[in-house]
């Protein structure tokens, strides 16, 4: 399977156990796709807050599926953009 096809499957995934399997595969782009996905569960998104890539953390902070408690924690993250995105997302979900 080509990388694009694989990432398309990741994007369309709606099953948390499958998402965990994708993360364990450690394929390039998987964490970013899950961080951006509206289908990602709050648990998956919470796990991704510890990802090494700052871009993944940015996307988690922007994702409206991220749990409020996670967004509140990210609002005091060491990275300015993570803090800003988390605060903006909190405003969206509280509106």
Image (cartoon, rainbow, N blue to C red):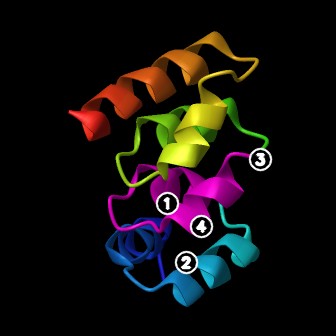
Residue 20 picture location, percent across and down: 64, 79
Q: Are marks 1 and 4 in contact (CB under 8 Å)?
A: no
- Label 1 and label 4: CA atoms lie apart by 11 Å
Q: Are marks 2 and 4 in contact (CB under 8 Å)?
A: no
Say whether residue 69 is left or right of residue 37: right
Vertically, is 72 above or below 7? above
Q: Which mark is residue 50?
A: 3
- Label 2 and label 4: CA atoms lie apart by 10 Å
Quarter holding residue 26: bottom right
- Label 3 and label 4: CA atoms lie apart by 12 Å
User: Label 2, on which residue?
Assistant: 19
Q: Is residue 1 magenta?
A: no
User: Label 1, on which residue?
Assistant: 34
Question: Dot 3, how many residues are within 10 Å of its Cα: few (below 14), some (14-19), or many (20+)?
Answer: few
User: Label 4, on which residue?
Assistant: 43
Q: Are marks 1 and 2 in contact (CB under 8 Å)?
A: yes
Which badge, 3 or 2, comes first in the chain's sequence?
2
- Label 3 and label 2: CA atoms lie apart by 16 Å
Q: Are marks 3 and 4 in contact (CB under 8 Å)?
A: no
Q: Which residues are magenta?
A: 29-51
What residue appears at the point 49 percent right and 60 percent down from the top-left corner? 34
């Amino acid at each position: 399977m080509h990388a694009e096809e694989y990432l398309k499957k990741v994007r369309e995934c709606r099953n948390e156990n499958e998402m965990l399997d994708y993360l364990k595969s450690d394929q390039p782009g998987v964490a970013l796709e899950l961080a951006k996905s509206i289908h990602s569960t709050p648990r998956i998104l919470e796990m991704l807050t510890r990802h090494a890539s700052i871009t993944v953390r940015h996307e988690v902070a922007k994702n409206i599926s991220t749990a409020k408690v996670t967004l509140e924690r990210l609002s005091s993250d060491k990275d300015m953009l993570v803090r800003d995105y988390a605060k903006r997302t909190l405003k969206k979900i509280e509106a």
